[in-house]
Image (spheres, rainbow, N blue to C red):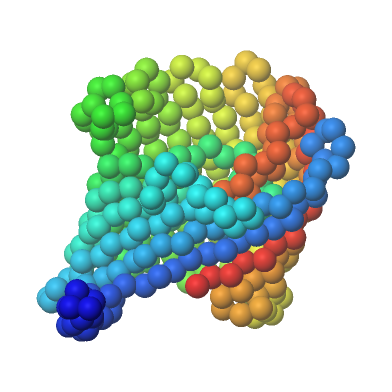
Amino acid sequence: MKKITRAAICLVTAMPALSYASGNVTLFGIIDTSIEVSNVGNGTVARMDSGGQLGSRFGLKGTEDIGGGNTVNFMLEQGIGSNDGTAANPTLAFSRQAWVGMAGTWGEFRVGLQNSPVYIYVNGYLDAFTVATIGSAQASFQTLIPRSNNAIFYQTPRIAGLVAQFMIGLRDQTTKPMSGAASYHIGIEYDRGPVSAATGFQRLQNATNSSVLEVFTVGASYAFGPVRLYVGLNNARQSDGSLNKNAYTTSLAWTINPASQLSFGIGHASDRTSADNDGNQIGMMYWYFLSKRDTLYFSAAFLKNMHKATYTMNGATTVGIPVAYAGADARGIQFGIQHRF
């Protein structure tokens, strides 16, 4: 009884401190689940997906005001499978992001596991589908490394609609050599009035330093009243010659009313190796916003592979069903619901 009493006293005494410490910490997440019916060359397949429009996740984020207009910030984020409850990567406690940093009028600085500037900041300017659901040709055709371990990140203040991000990913005990930079990421955005544009670059060495992937991405959009037109280009090259590809996309988003939006798009993947394995896709997506936190969506797409191409329809974090054979076409529809908290 004495031990129980002491524990209770300690808990009550600690409650103000716990309340203060957690005052600026937010639990957040996204639950995104969809049902996909598709044909990838061997008959109709139905499956339930997690992360069709945005990757399902949960996490903690926080900020602490340290005075002078400066804050200390952190984020811990884990990807999950909302269709089966599994962790996106069961070997990691936080597979999407785990960083701490500072921000102020001078910009923002972070260290840790982070999203690449090209993945989050640049991608949003390319595509009326936000590079998500099976309707997006960008999601099907682009090559991109979404995040980096051991990353050092800096973002400039936004000036006249212009902002830039720079990130370096360091090597560690899982790579050879174990020191030095493994990746470089740059993103530059412009957003003012009806015009939005962005460009980004990634350079990533593999774990053994035997090959280098370089990715260049650029896109822009312009709003004509309720309609916004997008164009995007993604170029990816592997130094060993295994990859040399351009992905071109054009799409538009029509805001029908505050509760609904319709997106259409086409895309072409151009294989610049001697294999000449190209692909074309046409897609659409309808969004219905039940509230600020809840969205219903419907997507449909037809993807034509040429020669021995094996492209398939991907979601935001959902890998598409592989085509039955090289050169097979893919087609499908997708119904989803998303909740944010």
Closest to the observer, 196 or 51: 51
Q: Does the rendering let one see residue 277?
A: yes
Q: Is residue 165 above or below residue 234?
A: below
**x then y, percent, for residue 245:** 57, 29
Say which quarter of the image contains residue 190.
bottom left
Q: In this view, does 163 lie to the left or right of 32?
A: left
Q: In this view, does 4 lie to the left or right of 35?
A: left
**x then y, percent, for residue 329:** 80, 34
Q: How many numbered dots are placed on residues in this image?
A: 0
Q: Is residue 14 left or right of residue 40?
A: left
Residue at the location (42% across, 31% down)? 214
**x then y, percent, for residue 161:** 37, 66
Residue at the location (65% across, 59% down)? 33
- Outermost residue, front direction? 1
The N terminus appears in which quarter of the rendering? Answer: bottom left
Closest to the observer, 328 or 51: 51
